[in-house]
Amino acid sequence: MFPLSVLDLVSVKIDKTPADALTESLELAQLADGLGYLRYWVAEHHNMVGIASAATSVVIGYLAAGTKNIRVGAGGVMLPNHSPLIIAEQFGTLESLYPNRIDLGLGRAPGTDQLTWQALRRDPRASEQFPHDVQELQQFFEPVKEGQAVQAVPGGNLNVPLWMLGSSLFGAQLAAQMGLPYAFASHFAPASLDQALEQYRHFFKPSGQLENSYAMPCVSVIVADTNEQADFLFTSMQQRFLGMIRNQRGKLSPPIDDIENCWNPMEKAQVESMLSCAFVGDPETVTEKLQNFINRTHADELIVSAGIFDQGAKLHSYELLAGIRKQLVPA
């Protein structure tokens, strides 16, 4: 059975609140837990009215408390926004509360705009220290040494798995160099996917955490009973990405009957390029598309995002996808 996981953007919908988004995320996490999904990740974004996971570690604790077996984690924490010690303490606390269920994915981007980054009180050059900060964070999770002056409490002596996230070759090369599992953001930036995976595997060096390379691309998947229903649901994501390229980020919109009236040809081409790793359709259609993607990328696991407005349709999509998982085979 091919391993599938969930990336939840904790989307705030039009006419809804962040509290509503968090409640719906817990409902989806509980469903995913029961259906046997491997992990459930949320991501750090700031100053975005359509995403409610800014306090990422707090959301992870909420989701982990409401589930039993599924791994819960960050996909990811934007490390330049934080000191490594603070993140080690937060995720050391989570690991202490929910042993062997916490993942920590790390990103180099700020997860926001320049003005908001200033409000976070971070130095714009902080991203240049990212490789050093990852190493420092690793050290806080290692066995505490005698006489160690600064410890993460909780954190030291805890085995919190680190993941490297990326949408470019930099993250792939750093993940390979450090011997970390690698998650690629092909759900919104697919252009460098094949080259990044090739470099990651070619340059991978075994580490204490990981003996062999392990790649997990993120893709968007919407499954419905018919192709027409899935295409209709997909228009919410298409509207969101159209807003991104127009620099008009807002709450998630309901689906519409005719997406063609919303964009010009250039915008359509740009949105379709960004969503080239979105697989939409009925179970038979999506099974074929996902298997072709696995065969092409040799992915070890897929993590799936679904920007569906209606909660019932979203839950149903992940139910159908759980059935598809049984038919997927590794490359």
Image (cartoon, rainbow, N blue to C red):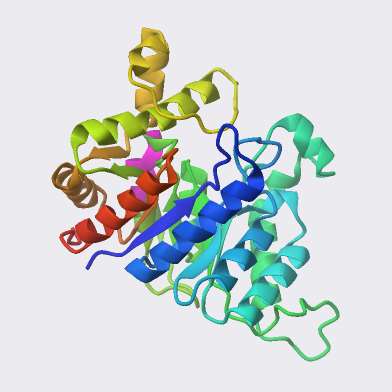
Residue 214 % position (x, y) = 37, 63
Quarter-wise, where is residue 47 in the image? top right
Q: Is residue 329 among what the camera can see?
A: yes
Residue 167 % position (x, y) = 47, 42
Image side of residue 23 versus residue 275, left or right = right
| Viewer-proximal residue among 158 and 318 | 318
Location of residue 132 with respect to 247 vertically, above or below:
below
| Viewer-proximal residue among 151 and 248 | 248
Quarter-wise, where is residue 106 in the image? bottom right
Residue 302 % position (x, y) = 34, 55
- Residue 17 is inside the magenta segment: no
| Magenta stretch bounds | 191-198
Q: Residue at x 60, y 27 (%)?
A: 249
**On-image quarter of the C terminus:** bottom left
Q: Residue at x 32, y 51 (%)?
A: 316
Location of residue 283 with respect to 40 vertically, above or below:
above
Q: Residue furthest bottom?
A: 146
Q: Residue at x 20, y 61 (%)?
A: 330
Q: Residue at x 36, y 26 (%)?
A: 273
Q: Is residue 53 among what the camera can see?
A: no
**On-image quarter of the N terminus:** bottom left
Image side of residue 172 versus residue 127, left or right = left
- Residue 192 is inside the magenta segment: yes
The secondary structure that dominates the magenta segment is: helix
Location of residue 315 with respect to 94 vertically, above or below:
above
Image side of residue 302 versus residue 66, left or right = left
Residue 157 % position (x, y) = 66, 85
Location of residue 307 with respect to 177 vertically, above or below:
above
